[in-house]
Amino acid sequence: MKRIRLIPRLDIKGPNLIKGVHLEGLRVVGDPQVFARRYYEQGADELLYVDVVASLYGRNNLHDIVARSARDIFVPLTVTGGIRSVDDVVTLLRSGADKIGVNTAATKRPELIGEIARKFGSQCMVLSIEAKRMGDGRWEAYTDNGRERTGLDVIEWAKRAVDLGAGEILLTSIDQEGTRAGFDLPLVSSVSRAVSVPVIASGGMGKLDDIGSVVLEGAADAVAMADVLHYQRLTIPQMRAAAHAAGLATRNA
């Protein structure tokens, strides 16, 4: 029985939890600490924090938010957005993060992946990929919260990153993100089957059946979701029950 993880995704801009569609049209949802606590109490396996404007301003501003979360939330915390150096990683780990996601800086200097993996272990180094469909079976990696093209083929980039030391892939479909229309199954499947590390599928979760589809058809190892949780369309216990009904195990019973 495959074991998966259910991971609430919290996109942060300044002090606020926000949500958009296709990574655009960002709207304030509320206080990220309140939502994080709710998801932890519901039984989330991990929490994912994304600073959506960090690369634009050249810094990650989640240190205080992560530090507050780490005081009373006892599941792994992954933090991504604006990480440009090993020193940035040190700061966030000291704040309470368990894993660090890198996107923009890695596309510009892939050696950073290896530097982080060697110093902190591959399990700490998460490559964040924002993927946009370019045609049948082709996706391009974007950066800066879906604003900038890189010219990198998503599948080849994922494989290279793993060779450099990435221990996990956070794969966000720009096309599906915020739509509640389901995950991009061909994208998730293509990346999952191309790499030997866990893949977190993000972007498109809208109904309970999407969990089974992205794991059984897409071969994802974890599922990230935002809209359906933030607006209380679904709960973590409902998702866990749906996963179990599909024959999947979860980290928390």
Image: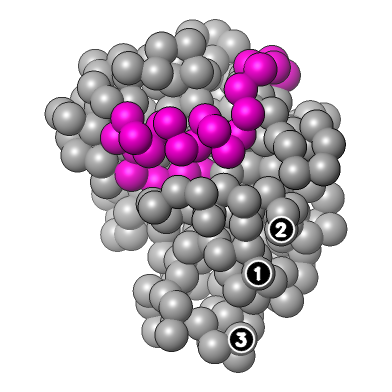
Q: Quadrant of residue 150?
A: top right
Above or below, 244 relative to 9:
below
The residue stretch that appears in magenta: 147-170
Magenta includes 169? Answer: yes
Query: Does residue 234 lie above or below 72 as drawn?
Result: below
User: As displayed, is residue 81 above or below residue 30?
Assistant: above
**Quadrant location of the C terminus in the rendered image:** bottom left
Callout in the foreground (3, 1):
1
- Residue drawn 75% across and 44% down? 137
The answer to whether mark 2 and mark 3 are in CB contact below 8 A is no
Mark 2, residue position: 185
Q: Give left or right: position of 239 versus 210.
A: left
Front disc: 2 or 3: 2
Q: Residue at x 27, y 46 (%)?
A: 123
| Label 3 residue SS | loop
Question: What x and y, as percent, mark residue 164?
Answer: 32, 30
Between the residue at mark 2 and the residue at mark 1, the CA separation in whole angstroms equals 7 Å
Q: Are marks 2 and 1 in contact (CB under 8 Å)?
A: yes
169 vs 136, left or right, is: left
Please, what is the three-letter code of the amino acid marked with disc 2? Leu
The residue tagged with tag 1: helix, strand or loop? Answer: loop
Mark 1 neighbour density, 10 Å: few (under 14) some (14–19) many (20 or more): few
Separation of marks 2 and 3 at Cα, in angstroms:
17 Å
Residue 58 visible, this orientation? yes
Q: Residue at x 32, y 17 (%)?
A: 111
What count of labels does the image hold?
3
Quadrant hosting residue 86? top left
Residue where numbered disc 1 is placed: 217
Numbered circle sitting on residue 246: 3
Up/down of 202 relative to 118, above or below: below
